[in-house]
Structure formats: structure tokens, C-alpha cells
Amino acid sequence: MNKDTKQWYASWFDTPFYHILYKDRGHDEAQAFMANLTSYLNLPDLGTILDLACGKGRHSVYLNSIGYDVTGVDLSENSIAHAKRFENNTLHFKVHDMCKAYPKQFDAVFNLFTSFGYFENEEDNLLTIKAIKAELNEFGFGVIDFMNADYVIANLVPEDSKTIEGITFNQKRYIKDNFIVKDIQFTYDDEEYTFTEKVKALTLENFQSFFEQANVTLLDIFGDYKLSKFDKESSERLIMIFK
């Protein structure tokens, strides 16, 4: 992808500032979720997992540490370069666009922690579902862990600030064209930076439509990382298991 045609996520996710802002995301909760998920799916010993949009690879590293053969892929060259230092015989990282099918099949394909819905082009959402289907072997399961857009919109915090490593990030959140938008502004070394995150406010009904078009079967829906029942009004997450 040419630098001048990069979408916002390709440039923002490639900066060190993105990783500083989100470095305190709950490790323990994330690891408990993956332990719950792999147990629920009853994946085989040394089962193969594709971690789609893996970022710097910390979830891939954890999944590998509990006994799985993991391939982590991400569009960010910087993130994959960082992740590659953790590689071993059963842990691999590649730069890859998740809209296209990876040339291998897996026991599970995980798309975790709202790593979906960034695309400007609506068709790319469906292409990603179709790619996940192609990446699953005969017994494989797909997992998309997305935000519950209804809950997020109802509980949106319009403005806040947080200071991490001496950088004060000023954040503004709003809804525009059915995207949940966050503007992030901060100063570093006397230079002002502004980045924007945009995630499509996709609902369960939207995903059901994608699944139908991709000829995918939705098996289960959970509303949090403990795999509790999904409730449209009170669940923070929308976790979908399909094949």
C-alpha cells in the first residue's frame, strides 16, 4: 500500500504514540479471555490459530505460551517488525491485509479487541468475513470480538484527557456517518499532533447480514470476556463464534 493512499489506521497504528496511549489495556483480562475462549472452543493440543490484526503480537505470544501454534498478521510493518523478535518454531508473524485470505487454513481465526470495522469501503467488511471463512479448516472456528456499538454509543464520553509517559492525550468522541470517531490531540517535543480513530458502529444485525452473504454460520454470541450471554443494552462486547 502506497504511503499516500494509506488509511488512517495504517499511519496511526504505526506510530509509537498509539502504543503509549493504549499500553495499559488490561493484560490479565485479555489473557483470561483467551484462556476462556480456547477452552470453550476445545481447540486441539498444538492447534493452529491465526491472530488477525495482531498489532505488536502480545496476544499471539500469550496464545503460543499456552500451547498453540500461532500466526499473527497485521497491516502495520512497524508492529510486525517488533513482534518478529518473539518468533519461534510455533509462532510466526507476517505483514498481511486481513481483507485477503491468508494462504493457509487454521483450527481457529481470532479477530480480537475491536480490530474490525475500520474500513472506509463497506465491501471490505464482507471481504474480511469471506477471508476468515477461507482461512478455516473443516473443523475450524472464527471469532470476532467487537464492541457492542449500542452500549458504546449510549455511554459515550464526549471528552477526556489522560497523561501517559509525560504526554497528555486530549480525546474527543462523537458519532459521524455511522462511525464512532475519536480525535486525539497531543504535544510532543514542542510539536502538535492530531490523529483520528474511526470504527464503524456495526451491530449484531450488520454482522448477521455479512455472515449470511459470506455463507457463514453464527454459532454463539457472548457479551463479555467471561463469555456471559449477550445483552444488546448492557453488554460491553459483541463476541461472535462462527464457522
Image: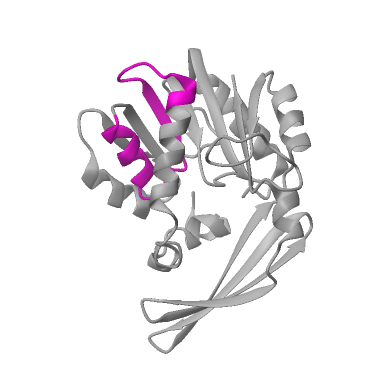
The residue drawn where x is 51% and y is 41% is 112
Left or right: residue 105 compared with residue 175 = left
The residue drawn where x is 72% and y is 44% is 202
Q: Is residue 182 visible?
A: yes
Camera-nearest residue between 148 and 225: 225
Q: Locate residue 108, reporting x and y percent.
A: 46, 24
Examine the structure image and report whether residue 75 is included in the region drawn in magenta: no
Q: Locate residue 125, reporting x and y percent.
A: 65, 38
Camera-nearest residue between 191 and 232: 232
Examine the structure image and report whether residue 43 is included in the region drawn in magenta: yes
Which residues, given as a range, are shown in magenta?
Answer: 39-66
Q: Quadrant of residue 46?
A: top left
Q: Residue furthest top?
A: 138
The residue drawn where x is 64% and y is 58% is 198
Q: Considering the image in quadrants, where does the C terminus appear?
A: top right
* Whether residue 159 is situated above or below residue 235 in the rendered picture: below
Q: Locate residue 19, reporting x and y percent.
A: 40, 62
The residue drawn where x is 73% and y is 66% is 174
Q: Quadrant of residue 102?
A: top left
Camera-nearest residue between 170 and 96: 170
Q: Is residue 105 visible?
A: no
Q: Locate residue 91, reporting x and y percent.
A: 27, 33
* Whether residue 134 is situated above or below residue 8 in the rendered picture: above
* Whether residue 39 is situated above or below residue 22 in the rendered picture: above
Q: Quadrant of residue 163?
A: bottom left
Left or right: residue 174 compared with residue 192 = right
